[in-house]
């Protein structure tokens, strides 16, 4: 398979970036998107050119590092798929592929296709720990949790923090990410004692990081590689309003 790549190149956070064109010839259809970039980089290195810098780790759709905007869509147009799980058979011969980093002010570009997503880490840290004594480890089935709550908590916990929700939103909102992290513990008995503290801390940190408000257009759910529901956002809003009232009258 022969392709043309239009790749965003930027030497540093304060440098001016630009799109550069590369030929990607003889790419196997069974290769993943990141393996395709590996092949292109090997050829660039052989010629003495600077390789394309991009982020990756597990390459199994778990870590969320492979955050690329492909043809204008975070992780590509394939639903429920991370960049590392995208295979070249989804493209056609002689296609032109545009590859850019996630675009959001809270995600500044470090170099080329790599962005700094440490804002997500600070939001998670603002949620704090479960600092009550939960006792020694017990059999999982001995804690009675309704199946609906357990399933919802598990779905929320599937969030890998890749940032596709932010990159897809015209306001760069992080509400799907934050609501998933809040909803995960909010559906479990272990998360109830600090429920108000958690939602207040994480939402306030989200605002401090400069993320925008929800647009209610649900692009975040469409772009999410784990297909996390926007229902979590509505739940977070209710929890936040309740926590604000209780804080005000405490």
Image: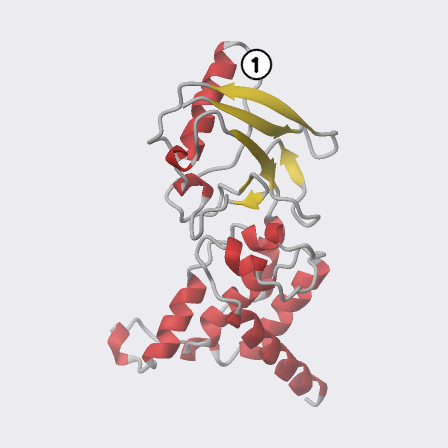
Q: Is residue 187 left or right of residue 240?
A: left
Q: Is residue 145 left or right of residue 65?
A: left
The residue nearer to you, when weighing 215 against 112, is: 215
* Furthest residue in direction top, as rendered: 47
The residue nearer to you, when weighing 213 against 133, is: 213
Quarter residue 72 falls in: top right
Quarter residue 18 falls in: top right
Measuring from the top left, give residue 84's x and y in whole percent: 42, 40
Measuring from the top left, give residue 57's x and y in whole percent: 43, 39
Q: Quadrant of the N terminus?
A: top left
Image height of 139 relative to 208, above or below: below
Labels in figure, total: 1
**Mark 1 — residue?**
49
Q: Quadrant of the C terminus?
A: bottom right
Q: Secondary structure at mark 1?
A: loop
* Furthest residue in direction bottom, as rendered: 249
Measuring from the top left, give residue 78's x and y in whole percent: 45, 47
Image height of 232 relative to 59, above or below: below
Measuring from the top left, give residue 146's x and y in whole percent: 34, 81
Give the class, few, some or many, for how many residues have Cα within 10 Å of label 1's Cα (few <14, many ≥20): few
Please indicate, yes or no, whether residue 132 appears anywhere in the rendered image: no
Quarter residue 125 falls in: bottom right
Q: Which residue is depicted at the point 60% across and 80% down?
A: 238
Please indicate, yes or no, whether residue 95 appears anywhere in the rendered image: yes
Q: How is the image coloured?
A: secondary structure
The residue nearer to you, when weighing 36 against 2, is: 2
The residue nearer to you, when weighing 178 against 249, is: 178
């Amino acid at each position: 398979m022969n392709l043309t790549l239009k790749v965003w190149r930027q030497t540093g956070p304060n440098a001016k970036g630009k799109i550069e064109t590369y030929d990607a010839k003889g790419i196997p259809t069974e290769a993943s998107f990141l393996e395709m970039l590996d092949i292109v980089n090997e050829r660039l290195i052989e010629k003495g050119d600077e390789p394309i810098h991009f982020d990756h780790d597990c390459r199994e759709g778990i870590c969320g590092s492979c955050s690329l905007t492909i043809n204008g869509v975070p992780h590509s147009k394939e639903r429920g798929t991370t960049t590392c799980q995208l295979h070249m058979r989804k493209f056609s011969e002689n296609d032109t592929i545009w590859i850019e980093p996630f675009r959001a002010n809270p995600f500044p570009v470090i170099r080329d296709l790599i962005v700094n997503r440490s804002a997500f880490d600070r939001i998670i840290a603002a949620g704090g720990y479960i600092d009550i004594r939960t006792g020694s480890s017990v059999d999982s089935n001995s804690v009675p949790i309704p199946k609906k709550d357990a399933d919802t908590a598990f779905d929320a916990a599937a969030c890998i923090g890749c940032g596709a929700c932010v990159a897809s939103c015209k306001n760069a909102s992080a509400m799907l990410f934050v609501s998933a992290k809040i909803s995960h513990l909010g559906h479990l008995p272990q998360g109830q004692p600090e429920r108000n503290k958690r939602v207040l801390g994480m939402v306030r940190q989200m605002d401090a990081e400069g993320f925008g408000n929800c647009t209610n257009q649900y692009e975040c759910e469409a772009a999410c590689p784990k297909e996390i529901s926007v229902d979590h956002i509505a739940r977070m809003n209710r929890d936040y309003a309740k926590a604000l009232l209780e804080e005000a009258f405490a």
